[in-house]
Each structure stands twice: as C-alpha cells, then as structure tokens.
Amino acid sequence: MSDRRAIIIDTDPGQDDAIAILLALASPELEILGITTVAGNVPLELTTKNARKICELAGRPETPVHAGASRPLMRRLVTAEHVHGKTGLDGPDLPEPTMPVQPQNAVDFIIDTVRAHPDGHVTLCPLGPLTNIALALIKAPDIAPKIARIVLMGGGFFEGGNTTPAAEFNIYVDPHAAHTVFTAGVPIVMAPLDVTHKALTSNARLDALRAKGTPVCDAAAALLDFFDRYDEEKYGTDGGPLHDPCVIAYLLRPELFSGRDCHVAIETGSELTMGMTVVDWWRVTKKPANANVLREIDATGFFDLIVERLARL
Ligand code: BDR
Ligand code: CA
C-alpha cells in the first residue's frame, strides 16, 4: 500500500470540478483510487462523459471512472446549465472520450474500496450533490468508521446561498443526502461558499495559467473563462469563485485554509430554506461539532498551487 493519500473524487463536472480533478491528477501526494460521478450540474450521462474528458486531457485514461446516482434521493434533479453551459463543460473544444466507464456502480465501488483498505485510509472528496456518498452509507453503514474523512465542497452560512437565498447548489440539489452524510459520524471538512467566494479567478490569475502555454493550462483557462462569466455578472467581481478545487488544495496544503469545528445541520423541512447548512459557528446549541467549517483562504497561495501543478500535466 502506498504512502500517498488515497482518495475517491465524487463529482458532477462542471468546469470547477474539472480543475479540481486536474489538480488531483497532477499531485503525486494523492492516489486517486477512482472517480465517481453523480447527477448535478448536468445529468449523469454528461457528468460521466465530462469526467472521462478531463482524465484524457490530463493523459490519465487509466483512471477508473464509475457512474453513480442519476437523481437525488427524494427530490427531482435540479441542474445548472445556466452556469456551466449545455455540456456542463462548455469553453474549450475537448474531444469525445474513448476511455471506458467501469462496469461497477459508483456506490458499490465506494463501499468495496473503503472496505478493502485499512481503517482510516480512504478519504472521500465530494464535489457535487452528496447522493452517492449517502447511498453508500445507507447501503453499508459499516464503512462509516472506516472512512478517514470526507472533505467536501458544499453549503454556505455567512455568505448565504447561491441557488436560493439560503442554499448552496450541491446541498440544495440533494438535502436529504447531505443530512445523511452530516449525521453519519464521519469526520467532515466542509468548504462552503464562505471560503470559495474568496478564491476568485481574476484576469491576472488566468493570465498566469495561460502563460504556462501547455495544452492542459490552455484548456483550464478556457474552461474558467467560460465559467467565470456567469458569476462575474452575478457578483460584479473580477473573476468568479473557484469552488471545488478548494477540496483538493485543502488536502495538499491545509495551511492555506482556516476554519472552525462546528455543528452543522441540514434543512430538509422548509421549502423556503431547503438545503440550508445551519452552522453553529458561535456554538450556541452546545451540540457536538460534526464538521470543520472552512472560512478563510490564502487565495494567492491557492492559485499559485493550481498553476504550478496544472503545468506539470
Ligand atoms: C458548486 O455547485 C456547482 O455548480 C459547482 O461545481 C460547485 O460544486 C458550487 O455551489
Ligand atoms: Ca461540482
């Protein structure tokens, strides 16, 4: 067994998912046991295709890609083509992938992989709705104490929501799955909008990526050029938030981030605030913490890391 940190990336690519996957594939500290796909930004068929496009862009077609849930546990699927484009990966013209989708379903792959490794060995990295992770925990509760931790992008508290005033997209799409995950007793690190909205892809940062002049850096810049346009208009900023790569960057360089251990509850009852992550930042409930909630980031260090790593591919 290698010394590298063993991870499973659960994802719904998505341009920012794509940068997260590239960052992980470029980082020798991480052993990517597999990529599992879920319906989210676009339907499952497209997120599965997009994950394979990114592996091939990185020159890593041997990466196992497993398709998972095609819809949330209880609610109808909400997608985000208005943000990510019709394909989910609009921007550069990436070729149709030829690498296979693995025959095993994502949920069973997660269960078997966690069981096959020593306790505390496998870290799960969800970058989309938490449907696959919840289904794995429901089908095989014995894996909960074996998972090292779950480092996820999702939620928002001080910053509010980006899909409704109260809810962030990943949690809003499948709040019941999020509730299952946040009550499973697995250590969680949560990268909410409070931190990702401080990781803005300014023009200068995209220029630094383009200046590397490699096919991967050029494609990444084209992905982000497309992705940013929506949030730049929405928030009036130079650049948009680069959400999902925060998860991988946290694994590589946790000192770039700071946060606080808090109790986090997920709203599943009220339509008005459905999918809200209720973070007890001030510890007013005295409920035990179930997540480390990130709030601050060294954005310069974060982008330097992305540019340096992506240039290696
Ligand atoms: C999250 O939603 C998706 O659109 C992004 O890929 C990210 O995972 C941000 O709210
Ligand atoms: Ca995502």
Image (tube, rainbow, N blue to C red):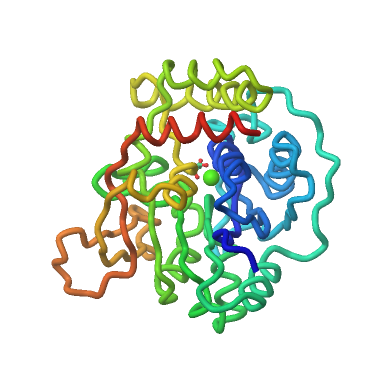
Is 25 in front, or is 21? Answer: 25
Q: In the image, what residue occupies the spot 16% across and 66% down?
A: 283
Q: In the image, what residue occupies the spot 57% across and 59% down?
A: 4
233 to 291, vertically: above or below: above
Q: In which quarter of the image is the N terminus?
A: bottom right
In percent of width and height, residue 75 lies at 54, 59
In percent of width and height, residue 244 lies at 49, 43
Please state the total of marks drawn on the protein image. 0
The answer to which image quadrant residue 7 occupies is: bottom right
Is 259 left or right of 164, judged from the image as shown?
Answer: left
46 to 268, vertically: above or below: above
Is 41 in front, or is 126? Answer: 126
Is 145 left or right of 33, judged from the image as shown?
Answer: left
In percent of width and height, residue 263 lies at 27, 67
Q: Is residue 92 visible?
A: yes
Is 260 left or right of 46, judged from the image as shown?
Answer: left
285 to 140, vertically: above or below: above
Q: In the image, what residue occupies the spot 22% across and 62% down?
A: 280
Q: Quadrant of the C terminus?
A: top right
Q: Can residue 165 be seen in this view?
A: no
